Image: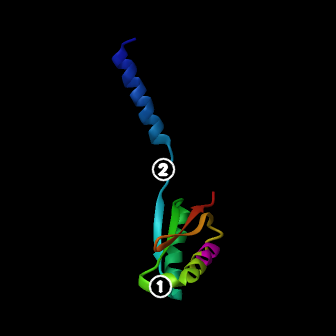
């Protein structure tokens, strides 16, 4: 067998394997610690749509300026968000503060 043909076949197999792998899509939603009810529901609707499509959702509470004092408010918002999305997805990563952001990741249910 020709060596070039062997390389060609190997490359083709690798390309085929790569095409079959599932691509993980992560959608991001940003909230504030003092978010209003209507805004919360609006973001919730988008997160529900993303989870139904099969994408992971990264929910982030961004603290501006002195609002970093209200870390507990941010965590409360994230936990409430997770509770509302309980039937569509499960929490993969619990709320964690990273600098001025508190991040939580929600994965879709199968």
Circle 1 sits in a helix, a strand or a loop, which is it? helix
Query: Which mark is in front, 1 or 2?
Result: 1
Circle 2 sits in a helix, a strand or a loop, which is it? loop
Relative to the observer, which residue lies in front, 82 or 75? 75
Estimate the x, y position of residue 50 in percent, counting from the top left: 51, 66
Estimate the x, y position of residue 104 in percent, counting from the top left: 55, 68
User: Is 3 located above or below residue 99 in the figure?
Assistant: above
* Circle 1 residues within 10 Å: few <14, some 14–19, many ≥20: some
* Apparent side of residue 68 relative to residue 87 in the rendered image (left or right): left
Relative to the observer, which residue lies in front, 41 or 94? 94
* Circle 2 residues within 10 Å: few <14, some 14–19, many ≥20: few
Q: Looking at the figure, which quarter contains the N terminus? A: top left
Estimate the x, y position of residue 92 in percent, counting from the top left: 61, 61
Residue that numbered label 1 is attached to: 67
Q: Quadrant of residue 65?
A: bottom left
Estimate the x, y position of residue 28 in percent, counting from the top left: 46, 67
The reply to whether residue 22 is in sight is yes
Q: CA distance from mark 1 to mark 2?
A: 36 Å
* Apparent side of residue 92 relative to residue 22 in the rendered image (left or right): right
Q: Which residues are magenta?
A: 79-84
Q: Looking at the figure, which quarter contains the C terminus? A: bottom right
Residue that numbered label 2 is attached to: 23
């Amino acid at each position: 067998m020709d060596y070039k043909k062997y390389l060609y076949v190997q490359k083709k197999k690798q390309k085929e394997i790569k095409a079959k792998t599932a691509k993980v899509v992560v959608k991001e939603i940003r909230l504030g610690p003092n978010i209003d009810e209507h805004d919360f529901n609006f973001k919730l609707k988008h997160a529900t749509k993303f989870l139904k499509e099969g994408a992971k959702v990264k929910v982030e509470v961004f603290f501006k300026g002195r609002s970093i004092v209200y870390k507990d408010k941010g965590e409360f918002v994230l936990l409430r968000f997770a509770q509302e999305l309980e039937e569509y997805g499960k929490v993969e990563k619990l709320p964690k503060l990273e600098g001025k952001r508190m991040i939580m990741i929600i994965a879709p249910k199968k």
